[in-house]
Amino acid sequence: MSLLPQRRHILLYSEGDAGFVQALKSQLEAQIFSVHCCRSLDEASIWSTRHQSLAPDAIVIDIPGERSSQSMNAFKFYDFVRRGGWIAALQQRFAGWGENAPVLMLIDAQKRLEMEERMFALGVQPDRIDYKPYHINILTNKLNSLFPPVAQGRPHRPPPFCTSAAW
């Protein structure tokens, strides 16, 4: 029996700055996560469809906030993950992972209210939210809170989406 923590698989979706994405990926991998990055809606949709039977342990969606089209693509990917969709490039339907793949969204702290209002209007309800600039230990704790407790062996659902800074 290994006492090492289980390596969790994370799908990171971001159309933001490449340097930021690489730094985030490196920091998560240093925290016992295995990370696959997708840099566009098409790439993320195709990857998800090809790995449909093997949902990641969690999905981190970065809302870049520089351009409205990038944040809309992030919200579209959230909807795709939850409900599925048709992938024309593969001529295949992705069934979606529903609630089986928890989602953490990273939002620019300066655009917090605007993004949260937009998420509410679109019906986007991530399991967790963290704000940029982020602290890797807080982000890691929020990601770990999405996973079932190991000792108890029963599923754990995080509390519903909340816009307060309490968590």
Image (cartoon, rainbow, N blue to C red):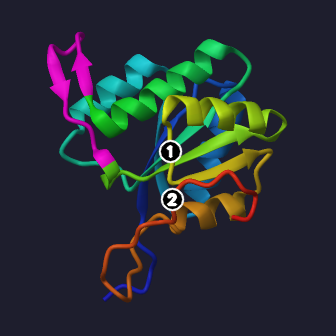
Percent position of residue 36, x then y: 44, 40
Rendered position, 43 above or below 91: below
**Residue 72 image-quadrant placement:** top right
Which residue lies at the image location 23% right of the left edge and 48% below the top edge?
54
Q: How many marks?
A: 2
What is the magenta range? Answer: 85-98
Q: Are marks 1 and 2 in contact (CB under 8 Å)?
A: yes
Rendered position, 140 above or below 154: above
Q: Residue furthest right?
A: 110
Percent position of residue 7, x then y: 42, 65
Percent position of residue 10, x then y: 45, 50
Percent position of residue 152, x then y: 36, 88
Where residue 160 is drawn, which disc sits there?
2
| Residue at which label 1 appears | 125
Instruction: Decide which of 121, 27 is in the foreground and name it.
Output: 121
Q: Amino acid at mark 1?
A: Gln
Residue 97 among magenta residues: yes
Q: Residues within 10 Å of mark 2 (few under 14, many from 20)?
A: few
**Is any atom of residue 39 visible in this view?**
no
SS state under label 2: loop
Rendered position, 23 above or below 44: below
How far apart are labels 1 and 2 at the CA level?
Answer: 8 Å
Of callouts 1 and 2, the N-terminal one: 1
Instruction: Decide which of 147, 124 is in the foreground and name it.
Output: 124
Q: Residues within 10 Å of mark 1 (few under 14, many from 20)?
A: some
Which residue lies at the image location 62% right of the left edge and 47% below the top edge?
26
Which residue lies at the image location 34% right of the left edge and 39% below the top edge?
82
Q: Amino acid at mark 2?
A: Pro
